[in-house]
Amino acid sequence: MNIPLLRQITSIRHVKHSRSFSIMSRYKEVRPASAAQPVTSGWKLPEPEESPLTPEVNPEDGAPAPAEIYPRIKGGGYYIRNAVPDEAKLMTAATPAPHSMPEKPKFLKVALIGAPNAGKSSLMNCMLNQSLAAVSPKVNTTREEIRGVVTDGDHQIVVIDAPGVIPANQTKGCRALARDAWTGYNDCDLVLLVVDTLRRPDTDLVDLIRRIAPKPDLSTEYHERRNPDLKPSSGQTEEETDKRPPVVLCLNKIDKSQRLWVQKRADQLKEHGAFKQIFFISAKKDRGVKALLHFLKTRSKDHIWPFPPAVKTTLPMVEQVEQLVRTYIFCWFNKDLPYKVEQQTVGWTPRLDGGLTIEHELKVQDSIVLRMICGTRNRIIRRLRQNVAYKLEQAWGIKPIQLVIWVKAKVVRRSRKDIQEYRAQFFEARATAKGNPKATVTH
């Protein structure tokens, strides 16, 4: 072939497939950082005399361990992972300052009781005006007890959210969650029975109502109607004679039903129990929640505040991250996949610009589930980072917050698509080996 013609074709190909970056700039971006060269972004590696990056020697094998320099963050630069501090792991202490309380503080402890997926966590988030507890259409999204604090004026209300007291099924885990849900009921001043208006009451719900809010006996009701001004002989009130806390019925999800059916549902439930008050609410649409809060203020008693006014929850910051991550995992994935995802916060690094870098780790069953959570080109996990980081910024008032999520698989398992690709590669290599005797097939 003519050499000038070959040069001309090569120059045309070069013009057609010209790149928009230089090799040196790409090399500077991916090469490892060193303490001798400063980082271009706001993050800088510490000087040797302040925090030396000398390798640590393991006393067992005597081999030096490399310094943990982690990948680049958004905007360039490297950082060193810091351990999660104790302040982020521990619960908020109940020690308010004396000067932060009003002259006549009032306090009330409320427990949310109801069937699974009735809207208890949504109601608490609406009362706190903050996305605190995990909320999803699946049952048993709440796995542990969560306490929220509502402070308004001279009143402080502690709301206790727990899993459903009615087991979703007869498995061992659901029965254990139902047993743990009664701890908040035994330690409260008032009970909010949250009922889904769209569901027809079953025997479990009727038994629950008769247990926590039983109707008086016929003889007692007869004497009360004949002598309404008659008081107990001991001089005690009705609430003091009955050790059970008063129960308020909250019919949730009224935005999805007509008013006539909501009223019929209330009349149907009143036949099985005695309630102090009945409220028609929609926790998702924030309807009727203000009237409920006003009623709770009237029921509060004179008592010192157990928490400072600025505290909205006793949940540690690490568990708040887990609750938000759990919300999206339960909403985006189906079947039993969300219930088998394990979470752990492994890094908590303050930034020089006042922000925070949180490293969160998700452990899944196998590599196939890992691909499902990450999504195509990591789109799902990237969207999860953005949504959780935004809600943390709104809740904590720290900006910017960068959330780094690592997904790890316990077992590496090949999918059907992988097996088909491996088989196709194997047969192609074997066909090539038959045509070339010197070629070898490895599989």
Image (tube, helix red, strand yellow):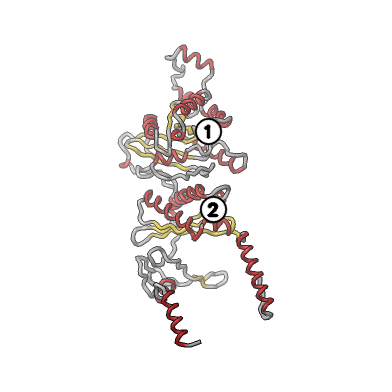
Place of residue 127 in the rendered image (x, y in percent of width and height, measured from the top left): 40, 39
Above or below, 321 against 178 in this view is: below
Q: Assign a secondary structure to mark 1.
A: loop
Is the residue marked by circle 2 packed among few (<14), some (14-19), or many (20+) residues within 10 Å?
Answer: some
> Which mark lies nearer to you, 2 or 1?
1
Q: Assign a secondary structure to mark 2.
A: strand
> Is residue 267 in sight in this rendering?
yes
Is the residue marked by circle 1 packed among few (<14), some (14-19), or many (20+) residues within 10 Å?
Answer: few
Above or below, 247 against 134 in this view is: above
Identify the disc placed on residue 199.
1
The image quarter in which residue 76 lies: bottom left
* In-front residue for pair 153/96: 153
Above or below, 282 against 59 in this view is: above
Identify residue type, mark 1: Arg
Identify residue type, mark 2: Glu
* In-front residue for pair 314/435: 435
In this figure, which residue is indicated by the disc labeled 2?
Answer: 342
Q: Residue furthest top?
A: 226
> Is residue 34 in sight in this rendering?
no
Q: Residue at left 54%, top 41%?
A: 139
